[in-house]
Amino acid sequence: MKKRIPILHHSIAQPLQYLHDLWRDIWEGVRSQPGRTLLSFLAVAVGSVSLTVLVAVLNGLEQRSTHLVRELGFNVFAVVSSSDRRTGEALRERDVQLLQANCPECGVSKVRRYEVKPLGHDQAVGVLATDERLAAIRQWTMLQGRFLDAGDVARRERHAVITEAAAKAFRWKTGDLIALSDVRFKVVGILQSTDQGVAAGSEPALSGGRREVYIPDTIPPAWSAGSDDGDRVDVVYVRVPDAERMNRLVLRTQRLLLTRKSREAFLSWVTPETLLGNVRRLQRSIRLTAGSVTLLSLILGGTTLMSLMVANVKDRVLEIGLRRALGASRKDIAALFVTEACLVTSSAALLGIAIAHVGLLLGAESAGLPILLDWKSAAVPLLAAMLLGVLFAYWPAGMAANIAPAEALRSE
């Protein structure tokens, strides 16, 4: 049975008929080579899955970098003491006083952290002894009530501010009396939980989003047996007047605190720049590793697609020659093959994007990396697949467009 060869040049006056004929021709070309088409389809789909995951992770890291700076506080850096609190090189109260005296233009606050089990609960909560300046320095938002004030600190009031996460976990609310070990505190405020990016893989005292309770640092820690516990400091926060003076003030604090070379091993400085630097290094690593796999998958899909197109051109020389004899232009022939390639790659991309999105939604919590699914995670793989179709179909489409009508007779 002879195959029907539709004429494409009349399609300008009948666009719907043109699309119908074009779609039928593409379907016939795909159906004539199902194995090659499926192989190319799967290769592009795998590349699209990889690219979708890559874009979603990079978007998540970019969002995380913003959250990191916001969580630490704008124009804020922290001096973190060693986790070995017994060493004489760790931060002490005299260091805080030294910074306050020599950096009068800055806001300085301190934090001392404990892990305490509330009475009646098996899970421990982070108890952070601090002063009244911490919330203002880190620019935290109160959901209810207030933060600690100067009166609480001076009078050693047993007042506590809890995070939103602690309120939900222990079902605490403003006005409740909570028992930390055997010491009772009254909840005077609930702090809006921030992102936990700073705390993750870093110093727990830097966090502001976990299950935590903030109390005045003048209250003796009855739950701690350390004799010098009231003098130690885990983290000092310094808020600078403007970002341009950040590096200068960091250097000043280093000169003040690193009076002995041995102390360098016990103190570290956390700035917005160092936080972003860690994220940027992770982004570069992911781009290099996952990006290489994605690129190889897409190139494999593209080369497979090109071989498919070349084979199609060779198998359809008679058809192409007859089209040219019946009035189809070179552009019509080239458009047929390019459109066919774009249809294969875009269909594969849509399948890959759907698989990747479903997988990321189901496994986001266990991924271990921040994930952000937005329009970019769908648009970038789709556009890349369509560009792949155009690029790798360009040469086969040119071959087809250059076939002269006389070649149909020689092929026959």
Image (cartoon, grey):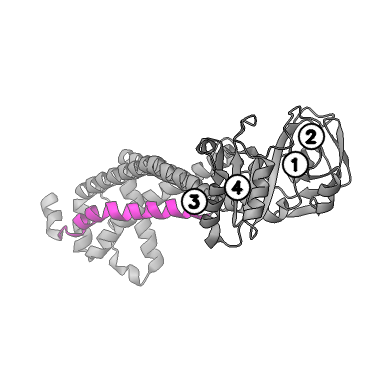
Q: Which mark is residue 78?
A: 4
Query: 95 or 20: which is nearer to us?
Result: 95
Is 402 inside the magenta-drawn segment? yes
- Residue at left offset 33%, top offset 41%: 296
Is 4 inside the magenta-drawn segment? no
Mark 1 residue crowding within 10 angstroms, few (<14) / some (14–19) / many (20+) = many
Real-space CA distance between mark 3 and mark 4, rounded to the nearest whole angstrom: 35 Å
Is label 4 in a helix, a strand or a loop? strand
Real-space CA distance between mark 4 and mark 2, rounded to the nearest whole angstrom: 23 Å
Q: Bounds of the magenta span? A: 375-404
Query: 286 or 198: which is nearer to us?
Result: 198
Sequence-wise first label, 1 or 4: 4
Can residue 198 be seen in this snapshot? no
Q: Residue 287 lies in what quarter of the image?
A: top left
Sequence-wise first label, 2 or 1: 1
Residue 23: image location, x then y, percent: 37, 56
Instruction: Name the side, left or right, on which 171 lies relative to 246.
Output: right
Q: Most prominent secondary structure in the magenta stretch?
A: helix
Real-space CA distance between mark 2 and mark 1, rounded to the nearest whole angstrom: 9 Å
Which amino acid does the dot numbered 1 rest on? Ala
The residue indicated by pointer 2 is 221
Sequence-wise first label, 2 or 3: 2
Sequence-wise first label, 1 or 3: 1
The residue indicated by pointer 1 is 129
Which amino acid does the dot numbered 3 rest on? Ser
Residue 382: image location, x then y, percent: 43, 53
The residue indicated by pointer 3 is 377
Sequence-wise first label, 3 or 4: 4
Is label 3 in a helix, a strand or a loop? helix
- Residue at left offset 13%, top offset 50%: 411
